[in-house]
Image (cartoon, grey):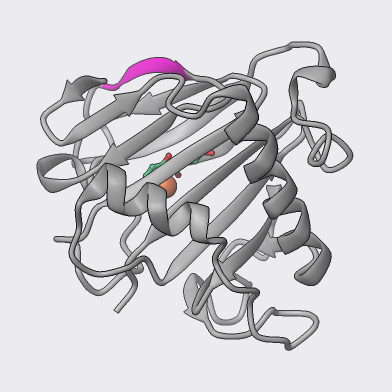
Amino acid sequence: MSEIVPGAFHYAGFLDKAEQTALAEEIAGVIAAAPLYVSTMPKTGAPMSVRMTNCGVLGWVSDKERGYRYEAQHPTTGDPWPAMPPRLLYLWNELTRYPKPPEACLVNVYDEKARMGLHQDKDEADFGAPILSISLGADCRFRLGGTRRGDPAIAFALASGDALVLSGPARMRYHGVDRILPMIATLMPPALAPFGARVNLTLRRVT
Ligand code: MD6
Ligand code: FE
């Protein structure tokens, strides 16, 4: 584990290959029940390059009309989100030690061209709760800035099996994914390879 800045904990290779494979199969099951969708930006309606779905009680969605928010139902099927696989609840407990369980797990799926702009995670009610991220598949170049958009940032790679916790003083730092680093697609666990090059899961408290 390395504490990149106070409250930001990077666990490189936290999941071994067998755990990555098992988690990938569980997330493929989530995608089968709750198909990937394209979110659009508030106001402009511009589509995001990352495709998304969720598991857990609540899921993160965005559209032109109503903006960023959490919803209990899938935006196109109207079904409740599938349950969070117990493995994710276990990882949350293990890595955050937060006394309440996560309510949402956002599944972000990247193809080689997808990126995620610099953002703060601030659609949650309690910024005292940490966010846990788990990565599968291709490496990305992850950027971690400060609490103001223009603050200097540091960049590092997130690889398959890595976990990242943003907590305490790091919880509101800006961050984003500059780019997916080229690699052979077979390094993505087979269950998720049909969907994209990289998958990132972010587990949060919402209420
Ligand atoms: C990604 N991650 O790695 C995007 N947010 O694809 C995030 O936006 C993120 O990694 C909050 C905490 C950790 C993260
Ligand atoms: Fe984020």
**Horizontal relation, residue 54 to residue 27: left or right:** left
Q: Up-down: is 178 above or below 155? A: below
Q: Position of residue 45 (x, y in %)?
A: 67, 65
> Along the horizontal axis of the image, is 150 left or right of 112?
left
Image-quadrant location for residue 115: top right
Nearer to us in this view, 162 or 77:
162
Question: What segment is highlighted magenta in the picture?
Answer: 153-157
Vertical position of residue 18 compared to residue 36: above or below: above
- The answer to whether residue 146 is seen in the rendering is yes
The answer to if 111 sits in the magenta stretch is no
Residue under the image location 61 percent in, 53 percent down: 107
**Image point (63%, 77%), residue name:** 81
User: Can you say which quadrant of the picture contains the C terminus?
Assistant: bottom left
Q: Residue at x 42, y 26 (%)?
A: 14
Query: Residue visible at 53% across and 82% down?
Result: 71
Residue 168 is situated, as x and y percent measured from the top left of the image, at 12, 47
Residue 101 image offset from top left, x and y in percent: 32, 68
**Ligand 1 position by quadrant:** top left
What secondary structure characterizes most of the magenta part? strand
Above or below, comparing residue 170 to residue 98 in the picture: above
Q: Residue 118 location in percent, x, y?
A: 42, 39
Is residue 43 shown to the viewer in this render?
A: no
Q: Is residue 188 left or right of residue 119?
A: right
Res 153 quadrant in image? top left
Q: Can you name the residue that lies furthest to the right here? A: 194
The extreme top residue here reads 183
